[in-house]
Amino acid sequence: MTETPLAYADRVRTLLGYRTVSELIADDHNVFIDPYSALLSVHARIGTGNVFSPNVRIDAESDALRIGDGNRFFEGTRIEATDGGRVSIGADNEFGPHAVALLANRHDAVITVGSRVRLIGRIDLAGASTLGDGSQILGDVTAVNVSLVGGGSHRDPDPDLRGAVLKGRGRATGLTLARGHVINADGDFATAAVEAQSVYHPRPAVD
């Protein structure tokens, strides 16, 4: 008997180490908008309430990737926790829209993402990088070995209490940025000014 498209997709995914389409469809705890285009490693440990848009690809080795609850992975998101690298993701984060990649694909690469983090744009995050709660990377940014100190989310009424932010375009390497601070760069983030977020988002008036 001719193999059905679903049976073929399930067989190929099993051979390549991904969860089958049937398993994604049967997942009552997470949403896969297009289970035929989403690739999720069998080794990925994921929580509940996550939404996976079309064309998300997640590769991981055993015990190398943990994803919490309520995250949104927009189309084109790419996560690698391979070749000894590790990735840990908290809750209520946004990866996208646009192409976001978390690349822990070498033995010394450890990427830790807290909660309520936003990565919006063409973002490549690599190396030993930590994104604290509420931090953001916005624009067209390659970030390697960066540490963004956590704070409130982008909804916090006091911008200087929010997590650190990188925005603009260019490359950020080996940077540590404190809570409430932002670098708005065009090129090398290391040469751009560090500013208070209230420069861009004034505090609400107090009666």
Image: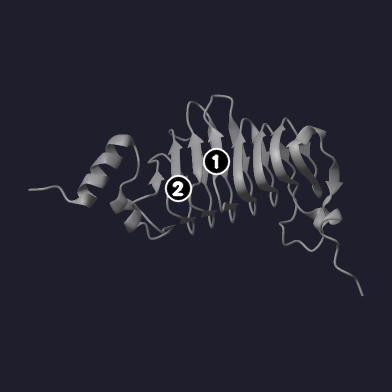
Q: Outermost residue, bottom direction?
A: 207
- The percent position of residue 135, horizontal first and vertical second, equals 70, 49
- What secondary structure is marked by label 1? strand
Q: Is residue 165 above or below residue 72?
A: above
Residue 45 lies left or right of residue 96; in this view the side is left
Q: How many marks?
A: 2
Residue at image x 81%, y 57%? Answer: 159
Mark 2 is on which residue type?
Answer: Val
- Dot 2 alpha-carbon crowd within 10 angstroms: few under 14, some 14 to 19, many 20 or more: many
What is the quadrant of residue 169 in the picture?
top right
Q: Is residue 9 above or below residue 28?
A: above
Residue at image x 39%, y 45%? Answer: 39
Residue at image x 48%, y 26%? Answer: 83
Instruction: Name the foreground residue: 73 vs 199.
Output: 199
Q: Where the C terminus falls, by quadrant?
A: bottom right
- Dot 1 alpha-carbon crowd within 10 angstroms: few under 14, some 14 to 19, many 20 or more: many
Q: Earlier in the sequence, mark 2 or mark 1?
A: 2
Residue at image x 75%, y 40%? Answer: 186
What is the quadrant of residue 141 in the picture?
top right
Instruction: Name the foreground residue: 84 vs 143.
Output: 143
Q: Outermost residue, top direction?
A: 107
Q: Outermost residue, front direction?
A: 186
Q: Outermost residue, right direction?
A: 207
Q: Which residue is mark 1?
A: 101
- The percent position of residue 74, horizontal first and vertical second, equals 51, 53
- What secondary structure is marked by label 2? loop
Q: How is the image coloured?
A: one colour
Mark 1 is on which residue type?
Answer: Ala
The numbered mark at residue 56 is 2
Residue 174 lies left or right of residue 32; in this view the side is right
- The percent position of residue 187, horizontal first and vertical second, equals 73, 36
